[in-house]
Amino acid sequence: TGSTRPQRMLKAVQKNATKGDPESVISAIDYYCRHREWAMNVGDEKGLILDSVLTEVNPGTALELGTYCGYSTIRIARLLSPGSKLITVEFNPDFAAVARQIIAYAGLQDKVTLVEGPSGDLIPKMKERFGIKSFDFVFLDHWKDRYVPDTKLLEDCGLLRKGTVLLADNVICPGAPEYLKYVKNSAHYESRYYKSNLEYTTVEDGLEKSVFLG
Ligand SMILES: O=C(NCCCCc1cc2cnccc2s1)c1cc(-c2ccc(F)cc2)cc(O)c1O
Ligand SMILES: [Mg+2]
């Protein structure tokens, strides 16, 4: 049987990036996905917005929902201060297997815990499993119709604190209309839209940054 898109992406990283150099892994993936084969990474353009929000928040504990091949996992982990941790959740075991190899190639495996399974089952177990009090930063990039239920789940499980920053990918394309309504109409969030483009295209997309007010 032939290779999959994530496996071809991994090959491109192993061929074109330098082991232990996250920047070169990010560049290799962006080059591959822009010039060879599109893939649903947050990408270089929205990635700059992710970087700037991360630098501002400087999270001690971060959560990513939707690992895919680990591109945004690396973008986040490379900016974490020493001792800070990122938990990333992936549903698809084949994606997770490639992500583990790409995260390790970048040398960031000590900052990242990759957990496989559906977010709805894993979120309620986060406190007991990882000894987490609350998250400082959450990147939502999984099933777009899970953004609202999982945000509510994070609230109900006491995993958000006053000031926790949620950053949601794809609020325009493919779109997360219920999520935009939820955070914009809620008195518990201060929300702001960062206009950008869908990864590697000129189609509009953007990130919604929402601060939990407690
Ligand atoms: O679907 C997208 N991402 C989610 C896939 C991961 C599914 C998971 C479910 C789940 C459940 N529990 C735990 C972990 C997880 S991971 C996605 C799609 C596009 C896109 C695709 C075609 C197109 F024409 C235009 C845009 C662009 C993007 O940036 C995306 O992120
Ligand atoms: Mg996305």
Image (cartoon, rainbow, N blue to C red):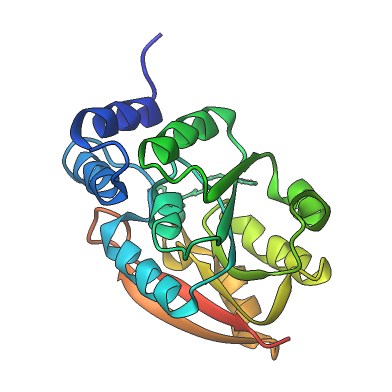
Q: Quadrant of residue 64?
A: bottom right
Counting every numbered tag in the picture gives: 0
Q: Is residue 178 left or right of residue 139?
A: right
Left/right of residue 207 with respect to residue 129 in the rendered view: left
Q: Residue at x 81, y 51 (%)?
A: 125
78 in relation to 98, above or below: below
Q: Would you say residue 64 is visible in this rendering?
A: no
x, y percent for residue 108: 44, 46
Name which residue lies at 38% across and 49% down.
Answer: 41
Above or below, 48 relative to 186 = above
Which quadrant, please, contains the N terminus?
Answer: top left
Placement of 123 over or under 159, stated as above or below: above
Residue sitting at 28 percent across and 45 percent down?
21
Q: Quadrant of residue 63?
A: bottom right
Residue 149: x %, y % from top left? 72, 62
Residue toward you, 85 or 73: 85
The spot of residue 12 in percent (x, y) is: 25, 31
Question: Seen from this angle, which residue lies furthest front?
Answer: 82
| Residue 38 shows in the view | yes
Q: Residue at x 33, y 65 (%)?
A: 46
| Picture coordinates of residue 58, whole percent (x, y) | 48, 73
Q: Is residue 17 left or right of residue 129?
A: left
Q: Split into 4 quadrants, where in the image is the C terminus?
A: bottom right
Residue farthest to the bottom, as pictured? 187
Farthest residue, direction left: 35
Nearer-the-camera pick, 181 or 103: 103
